[in-house]
Image: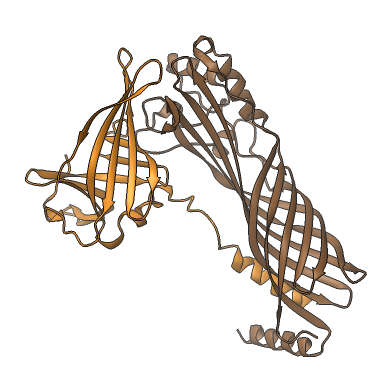
């Protein structure tokens, strides 16, 4: 019986490693899905809604742009004298014929944050609430509160594009 | 390594002695958690009665219930000899509760609590008759918790955890360790199936000292989160007062993840014989 107890104790320790959520790095939970197969996503459309004081929702405008979001792990030499390597999760926002910018990425299951690299933590660039999370499509919302006007919602529709090449080489894309 | 091989061989020899039976098990069922949600209900009361918000609230936040139900599933193993059974079981269970309020302009706030437990329990039971096993349960649990605080716009499908309101966010409690003690009852009604009922109480390995609750509190450290709202507050009015006064006094206004309690688990067990059970 004593030995059987040891056997089960061993199994308990082995199984203890299973089934845990990624609590330590929540900001990487959705990254794996976003960066899969090249990490290129087409922005299909961007919708702008507004809400009046009665809660009525109005679609004000819809934009269709040739825009990509490319999710990847960015690496660069941070200090040429000391040769510090720096790598972080990044998203390149590429507009065809215009250029693009690179942001640091925080990708939780329910929240996406694009942040300017090197800016204050008080000043993120965009925070999205994940409305729909599927392997081939993503729908994200961001909201604007206007004290003296209607509140607004901006909804971004993304479609995964595994065979697409980024509009620009990623090493050419700088942060803002 | 040598000892391990010898040990496995020993088990195999004992198995061939026809006295010991091994099973792999799978389990799925429902778990009821009886807990004390008072700290969250203190937030609810302070939010609903806040002098600034109260006139704007059409539907107040409702209290969180002290009884939460979740779907549990997992796997394990069992060894049986003579009238004694020793089992190990792992299962995972999530408990969700939501409380929502609306303002007079049809916007609102939604608070969702999500607690997850990962349980590793042993039982030493004795057979009573051909079908019933009854015994003592003990084990450990890991318990994680999250508080989702959404602003809602016009309808509940429009939800935001973005920074347009300070209290928006996804607040995470660090994973806590508990130990469990309770009773286990198993009724074997088919050759490979059993119904299992377990009642146990979880106890925290360690509780935070007074003044150090923030070390185990629900916090949101995402980029752009304002430092004043980094921790989910216990008292909304005190939180607002601190913000107004620029008083970064979060230590005394947090909810630590200390929610132990009773668990009642009912599961269907599938028993797969391992080796040549006789």
Query: Compared to A99, does B16 lie above or below?
Result: below
Residue drawn at the location 53% of the way across and 23% of the way down: B101
Where residue B169 sits: x, y (%)? 44, 34
Where residue B270 sits: x, y (%)? 70, 69
The orange chain is A
Q: Along the line of sight, which residue is nearer the eye, B40 or A65?
A: A65
Q: Along the line of sight, which residue is nearer the eye, A164 or B205?
A: A164
**Of all residues shown, which one is farthest toward the left?**
A97
Image quadrant where residue A129 sits: top left
Q: Taking the image as drawn, is residue A117 in sight?
A: no
Query: Compared to A93, does B51 lie above or below?
Result: above
From the viewer's perspective, is A171 left or right of B205?
Answer: left
Image quadrant where residue B10 sits: bottom right
Colour scheme of this structure image? Answer: by chain
Q: Along the line of sight, which residue is nearer the eye, A121 or A40?
A: A40
Image quadrant where residue B217 sits: top right
From the viewer's perspective, is B16 left or right of A74?
Answer: right
Where residue B42 sits: x, y (%)? 63, 24
Q: Taking the image as drawn, is residue A112 in sight?
A: yes
From the viewer's perspective, is A156 left or right of A54?
Answer: left
Residue drawn at the location 60% of the way across and 30% of the way down: B211
Query: Compared to B86, does B207 lie above or below?
Result: above
Q: Quarter of the image containing the N terminus of chain A?
A: bottom right
**Of all residues shown, which one is farthest toward the right?**
B129
Q: Along the line of sight, which residue is nearer the eye, B162 or A23?
A: B162
Colour that chain B carries in the picture = brown
Q: Quarter of the image containing the C terminus of chain A?
A: top left
Query: Compared to B180, does B219 lie above or below?
Result: above
């Amino acid at each position: 019986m004593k030995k059987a107890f040891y056997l089960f104790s061993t199994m308990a320790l082995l199984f203890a490693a299973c089934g845990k959520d990624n609590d330590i790095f929540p900001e990487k939970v959705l990254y794996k899905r976003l960066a899969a197969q090249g990490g290129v996503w087409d922005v299909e459309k961007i919708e702008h809604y507004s809400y009046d004081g009665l809660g009525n929702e109005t679609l004000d405008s819809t934009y269709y742009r040739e825009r990509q979001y490319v999710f990847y792990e960015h690496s660069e030499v941070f200090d040429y004298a000391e040769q510090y390597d720096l790598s972080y999760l990044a998203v390149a926002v590429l507009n065809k014929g215009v250029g693009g910018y690179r942001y640091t990425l925080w990708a939780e299951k329910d929240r996406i944050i694009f942040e300017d690299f090197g800016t204050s933590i008080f000043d993120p660039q965009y925070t999205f609430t994940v409305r729909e999370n599927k392997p081939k499509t993503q729908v994200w919302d961001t909201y604007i509160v206007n004290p003296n006007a209607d509140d607004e919602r901006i909804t971004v529709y993304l479609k995964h594009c595994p065979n697409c090449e980024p509009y620009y080489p990623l090493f050419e894309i700088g942060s803002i | 390594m040598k000892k391990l091989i010898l040990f496995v061989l020993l088990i195999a020899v004992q198995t061939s002695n026809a006295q010991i039976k091994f099973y792999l098990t799978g389990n799925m069922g429902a778990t009821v958690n009886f807990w004390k949600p008072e700290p969250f209900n203190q937030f609810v009361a302070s939010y609903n009665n806040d002098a600034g918000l109260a006139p704007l609230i059409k539907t107040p936040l409702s209290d969180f219930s002290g009884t939460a139900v979740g779907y549990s599933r997992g796997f394990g193993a069992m060894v049986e000899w003579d009238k004694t059974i020793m089992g190990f079981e792992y299962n995972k269970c999530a408990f969700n509760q939501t409380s929502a309020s609306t303002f007079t302009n049809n916007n609102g706030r939604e608070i969702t609590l999500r607690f997850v437990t990962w349980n590793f329990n042993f039982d030493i039971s004795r057979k009573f008759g051909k079908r019933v096993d009854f015994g003592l349960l003990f084990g450990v649990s890991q318990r994680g918790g999250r508080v989702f605080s959404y602003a809602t716009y016009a309808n509940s499908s429009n939800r935001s955890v973005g920074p347009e309101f300070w209290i928006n966010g996804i607040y995470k409690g660090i994973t806590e360790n508990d130990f469990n003690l309770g009773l286990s009852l198993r009724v074997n009604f088919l050759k490979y199936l059993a119904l299992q009922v377990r009642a146990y109480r979880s106890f925290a390995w360690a509780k935070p000292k007074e003044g150090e609750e923030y070390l185990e509190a629900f916090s949101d450290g995402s980029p752009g989160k304002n430092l004043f709202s980094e921790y989910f507050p216990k008292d909304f009015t005190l939180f607002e007062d601190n913000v107004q006064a620029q008083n970064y006094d979060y230590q005394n206004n947090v909810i630590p993840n200390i929610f132990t309690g009773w668990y009642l688990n009912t599961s269907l067990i599938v028993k797969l014989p391992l080796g040549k059970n006789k």
